[in-house]
Amino acid sequence: MLSRAGVAVLAAGAVVAAPLAAKGANDLRDLVGARAGQAEATVQDRGFTYITGHEGKHGAKHSYWWHARQKSCVHIKTSDGRYESITDATNADCHQSGGGGDAAAAAGVVAGAVLLGALLGGNHKQGHHDNESHYGNVNDEAHYERGFQDGLHNVAYHNYDRSDAYSSGYQSGVEQRERNTSHHHGRGGYAQVAQYNDLVGRSGEKAREILGDRGFTRVDRFGEGNTRYSIMWRAQSRQCLQMTVADERVYDIRDIGRHPACR
């Protein structure tokens, strides 16, 4: 098995290349605004095959589709159940090699960075960037990829190049890791715990009702005006939650571990 150092050497020796994004999104632009569940069949009918996807910020979904005959990859962003945008992506985003297409749409992915991501558990995609576009500079893209991998795999921040791209990639990797592990409650052992992360965005009243069904009891509350806080306790799993409700919606909910009322 290659060490991280070995991977870095291998990546440094790889050919530096910027795979270009072919024009495939034009074939799908009429689907922007359509319901994802209904439009997916049309995407497939037009020759595209789903390759991979990930969850993004604010509940958005990012998927990457490959057209084998055109050798083109497209990035579809879905929000609130509808296609929000459909854009060209790089071949690397669809786990394909080779280039072609408009240089203006180039993602600037370094071959070594892609290899690094592949060996460590998946390289970042177009949708991971804040502006949903890869860097045009191959060095910036490589720094972002290294930062993304470090954040994704929960290793120490190590920005030895003092690169803004590394910093952005690290933050994106941390956010993706948190989304990937949102099912986990931060507790080990064998005791079964109750889910609560799925309540963000629900009405405060409905969230308290659901938590009650899951075995929680409200043991304290405070705050006034538009923002109120509830302390919820589940003795069976010793979960002590603080739920923040703003404008009647759950803004934040987290396990705070201890509270005088949680006993």
Image: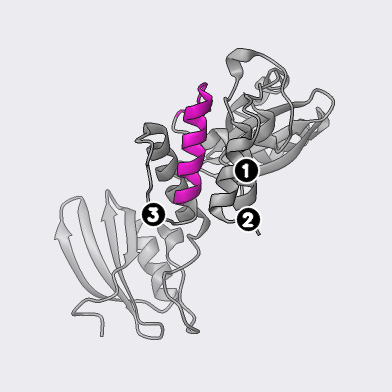
Disc 3 target residue: 156
The span picked out in magenta is 131-151
Tag nearer the camera, 3 or 2:
2
Mark 3 or mark 1: whose residue is earlier in sequence = 1
Determine whether the residue tagged by mark 2 lies in a helix, strand or loop: loop
Labels 3 and 1 touching (C-beta < 8 A) = no
Give residue 148's position: percent from left, percent from top: 48, 44
- Residue 53 left/right relative to 194: right
Is residue 32 something one can see in this rendering?
Answer: no
Determine whether the residue tagged by mark 1 lies in a helix, strand or loop: helix
Is 120 or 46 nearer to us in this picture?
Answer: 120
Determine whether the residue tagged by mark 3 lies in a helix, strand or loop: loop
Quadrant hosting residue 250: bottom left
Is 112 or 145 nearer to us in this picture?
Answer: 112
Mark 3 or mark 2: whose residue is earlier in sequence = 2
Labels 2 and 1 touching (C-beta < 8 A) = yes
Give residue 80's position: percent from left, percent from top: 53, 40
